[in-house]
Every structure is written in C-alpha cells, then in structure tokens.
Amino acid sequence: SQTIHQWPATLVQPVGSPLSLECTVEGTSNPNLYWYRQAAGRGLQLLFYSVGIGQISSEVPQNLSASRPQDRQFILSSKKLLLSDSGFYLCAWRQGRGTGELFFGEGSRLTVL
Amino acid sequence: GIQVEQSPPDLILQEGANSTLRCNFSDSVNNLQWFHQNPWGQLINLFYIPSGTKQNGRLSATTVATERYSLLYISSSQTTDSGVYFCAVMKGYQKVTFGTGTKLQVIP
C-alpha cells in the first residue's frame, strides 16, 4: 500500500534562517505531489505542485521554493525565513494519471521567531 | 481559477444531532473530495465523490455535479466528529483547490 511521510513534524526557526521540509511517498510511481500551507487554523493554500522530476509549478509568489530531485521526493525550502512563513505545511500526493484521490502526510508545524 | 465556498463556516451541535455541510464550486470539476481535519491537524479522507451519493457509517455525501454543489451529512454526531471539514475539487488533472472549511464543534 502507499504511504506518505513528512519531516520534521515540528520546527522552530529564527527569522532569516534557512528551511528544508521533506516529503516522501512509498508504494507508487510517478505521483503528482503538492505542498500546501495552512495558517491561522483554517484554509489550505496551494504553494507548489509537481507532475514529475524537476517539474515544479508555483501558485503563490513568495520566498519559498520547491524541488523534486527524485520521483517520490518533494522538498520545500527557503533561504531566509520570514515571520509570515509560520504555519502548518502539508504534503500530499495523488496518482499521476486520471483523477485519483488525494492523500496527505502528517504535516510539519513551523514557527518562525 | 475555480472558487470553492463552504457553509456554514462554524457549527455547534449537541451530541446526537444531525447536520448538513455544503460545498459550492464555481465551475465544472473532474473530482471532489471531503476531508476531516482533526484537532491534531491530520487530514483524513472521508469521501471521493465526483458525482452521486456514498455512505460510510454515520456519514454520507452527495455531489450534484451539474448544479455544482456537494453535501456532507453527519448523523448522530459524536464529540470525535469535532474538527474542520473541507471539500476539495480538481479541474483538469493537476491542481486541487480547497474550500474555506466548516469548523464543527460537538458538545456532550
């Protein structure tokens, strides 16, 4: 069966520090991968999605970036964090072909101080 | 892009009561899902329902794609049903857009 994992689960970082959140999917190949952010406990904002290795679509201009170095690995990064980057970050996947169901990881809670 | 609106935004129920949550979307979609986000932030898949009706225990969902809405029914609510309920739609085969959510609190 397919599984998705994110880490770290919790992160406290100072303003201006770098960020790296990782997400991996197991048990499938060529998935569509997504990064969402949830602020203030409500509403999921799509940040990035990827349909293949090296293919990244950005939905919101910001100081975050995403990369997909391997088929089942999706990384969210920042060179310098802002206070406004605090939030709950969720990685998700769905089967690349057709209109399959979306599945989420456990989430990473980021606090920028 | 496609707009997804959910109502009501907040709902308080007495344990044992029934409720209906609504999701309206602004364009035709290929896919629609309902999720429950528990107090720990985990998003749990409830229904994958681009059209028709499905039932799972005390929960059921109906999507009327031609009229661009979906309904989630919760019967005999329990305190563990508390949390935020999201619908999410897909137009095309890549992007998934979430609704604004309904925050449900079930009190004993």
Image: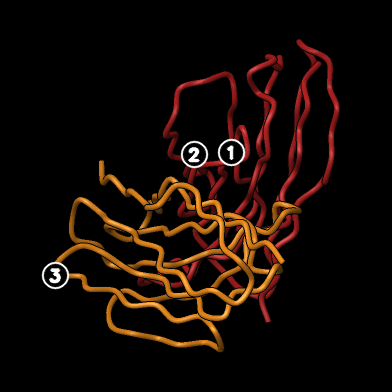
Whether A18 is drawn above or below B12: the answer is above
Q: Secondary structure at mark 3?
A: helix
Q: Are marks 1 and 3 in contact (CB under 8 Å)?
A: no
Disc 2 and disc 1: Cα gap in Å?
5 Å
Q: Exactly how many numbered labels are in the figure?
A: 3
Q: Chain of mark 3?
A: B
* Labels 1 and 3 share a subunit: no
- Number of the front mark, 1 or 3: 3
Nearest to N terminus: mark 2 or mark 1:
1
User: What amino acid is at disc 3?
Assistant: Thr
Residue that carries the numbered disc 3 in the rendered image: B66
Q: Position of residue B70 (x, y in %)?
A: 31, 67
User: What amino acid is at disc 1?
Assistant: Arg
- Seen from this angle, which residue lies furthest left? B66
Residue that carries the numbered disc 2 in the rendered image: A45
User: What amino acid is at disc 2?
Assistant: Gln
The picture quadrant where one finds residue A35 is top right
Q: Are marks 2 and 1 in contact (CB under 8 Å)?
A: yes
Q: Chain of mark 2?
A: A
Q: Residue at x 51, y 54 (%)?
A: B11
The picture quadrant where one finds residue A2 is bottom right
Residue that carries the numbered disc 1 in the rendered image: A37
**Observer-nearest residue: A70 or A88?**
A88
| Image chain in orange | B
Q: Residue at x 34, y 59 (%)?
A: B23
In the picture, measured across the screen, residue B1 lies left or right of residue B6, that is left
Q: Chain of mark 1?
A: A
In the picture, measured across the screen, residue B10 lies left or right of residue A104, that is left
